[in-house]
Image (cartoon, helix red, strand yellow):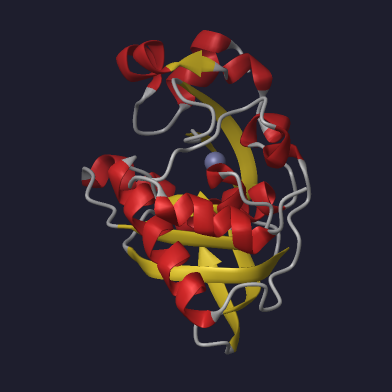
Amino acid sequence: MTDLRSQVEQLLAGPRPLPIVTAGTAVLRQRAEQYDGQLEEGMLTQLIEAMRQTMYAAPGVGLAAPQVGLGVSLAVLEDSAEIPAEIAEPRERAALPFTVLINPTVTPVGNRSALFYEGCLSVPGYSAAVERAADVTVSFTDLAGTIVEADYSGWAARIVQHEVDHLNGTLYLDRALIRSFSDLPNYQTHWAGASGERARAGLQF
Ligand code: ZN
């Protein structure tokens, strides 16, 4: 197996945005190795910048290293949340600044949960409803090497849980209410409403 440094060198020598691997690729199903300085600082910074560009280009609100074929515990997040208020409010979706997560672990806080549709850049063309904790604490290392504990709620908590799942070899479909599974044209035409009630009634999940 090629070591991480050679893999990253090869990836950074290629085009931007980085190619995103899709479901059925083994790296998406493996637990990512901890990042403990396998890359020199400049290379880590370049990789994070390339992941950031790839997330923007997709576009997406999060991207984990396994999605660009790297089995290492790194992810980037950012959500401008520029969507209509009637969609944002029930989802508690507010702007999330650009964040780098190194070796994150996530712990639910309290008992609140939320059930909403989500999608994944590695499962293009589909969407499904996933129940997730609405409030979480995340421990991670940032790009400066500082250990951070941060609380996230609402949609940001969903994004963080989705990305940390990627680092543990889990796809959102593993957690989805499978009867809610919808292709994007159907989702956008019929189910992308404010509350999700219509989808629950229509698809009976
Ligand atoms: Zn994903």
- Residue 30 image offset from top left, x and y in percent: 77, 44
Taking 113 as reference, is 99 left or right? Answer: left
- Residue 88 image offset from top left, x and y in percent: 32, 47
- Residue 53 image offset from top left, x and y in percent: 32, 54
Q: Quadrant of ligand 1?
A: top right
**Is 97 rendered above or below residue 195?**
below
Between 173 and 107, the one nearer to me in the picture: 173
- Residue 82 image offset from top left, x and y in percent: 22, 50
The reply to whether residue 199 is in sight is yes
Image quarter for residue 33? bottom right
Image quarter for residue 171? top right
Rendered residue at 70%/34% (across/down): 175
The reply to whether residue 113 is in sight is no
Q: Number of callouts in the render?
A: 0
Between 193 and 175, the one nearer to me in the picture: 175
Rendered residue at 31%/40% (across/down): 87
**Is 88 rendered above or below residue 36?**
above
**Is 75 rendered above or below residue 117?**
below
Taking 71 as reference, is 92 left or right? Answer: left
Q: Quadrant of the C terminus?
A: top right
